[in-house]
Amino acid sequence: MESWDFSGSAKWYDVILGKKDYEANAKFVSQQLKKLNVKTILELACGSGLYLSPLEKSGFVVEGLDISKKMLDVARKRNRNVKLYRQDMTKFRINKKYDSILILNSGLALLPDHNLINKTIEQSKKHLNDKGILLIDLPNHRKEIKESNFTQSHEQYKIPDGEMVVIFRDYQKENKWISEWDGFVKQNNKFSQFKEYYKELIYSPQKIEDSLKINGLKILKIFGSRRGKSFNPDNSWRRVYLCQKN
């Protein structure tokens, strides 16, 4: 099944990606936003809400938006006091503005083309207060393709009353970066499995940066990781844009 909303693995998404890693990433996001006097946040493609909880605990007023009902169901259980919206981020409409909008965890690259990426950036600008902050976390495909093209690996995870094994395959197919997850779960003496297949657009950084400029968003800094490392186009795994509305 082809998917870009992670609905197949929603139940196990947090286990696979690692809650502690997200909390550390959220600490960096929090530090950057506090420097820029951000109080209110909307996270697009918020998924299961792994960023929402630590950001709320850091004192921000946070809201989340995602297209997947299953992911929002998981997020709602974790973040009962956080307002969540089920909308398409390429055309979302909320009757308010925010100090910051976040598009983390490669969410923008899951869109199939630059036209939809531009629409998302345009909608984000409309929902930002003056001097508002847009933070976009993307993969650096130059590094990823060089290091991980046509690779296969597996991980084993302890889960309540059982265990889970996930096989990961990553490869380039035309202008898309493909990730396949095959999960095998044993829990309470029962077996189950899930599949995840999603495509990242191997986007053009120049087109992203042109879209930001056209929409009146100034790039303050580009980071090379989710923890604030310096960006190097050949060696960094991530490309994280910190932008401000002019």
Image: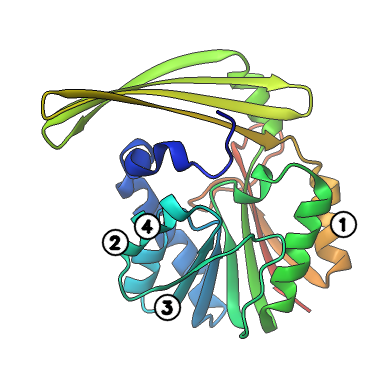
Q: Which residue does the numbered mark 3 point to in the structure image? A: 60
Amino acid found under the numbered disc labelled 2: Lys
* Kind of element beneath mark 4: helix
Residue 246 on image: x %, y %: 79, 79
Name the disc covering residue 73, or none: 4
Q: Residues within 10 Å of mark 2 (few under 14, many from 20)?
A: few
What separation in Å lies between label 2 and label 3 (alpha carbons)? 19 Å
Q: Residues within 10 Å of mark 3 (few under 14, many from 20)?
A: some
Asked whether, in this view, residue 70 is left or right of residue 218, the answer is left
Asked whether, in this view, residue 240 is left or right of residue 114, the answer is left
Asked whether, in this view, residue 224 is left or right of residue 191, the answer is right
Q: Are marks 1 and 2 in contact (CB under 8 Å)?
A: no
Lower position in the chain sequence, tag 1 or tag 2: 2
* Kind of element beneath mark 2: helix
- Mark in front: 2 vs 3: 2
Which residue is found at the position 78% from the left and 61% from the top? 119
Residue 245 on image: x %, y %: 74, 76
- Above or below, 140 against 124 in this view is above
Lower position in the chain sequence, tag 1 or tag 3: 3
- Mark in front: 3 vs 4: 4
Q: Are marks 1 and 3 in contact (CB under 8 Å)?
A: no
Residue 49 visible? The answer is no
Q: Are marks 2 and 3 in contact (CB under 8 Å)?
A: no
Q: Which residue does the numbered mark 2 point to in the structure image? A: 77
Q: Which residue does the numbered mark 1 point to in the structure image? A: 210
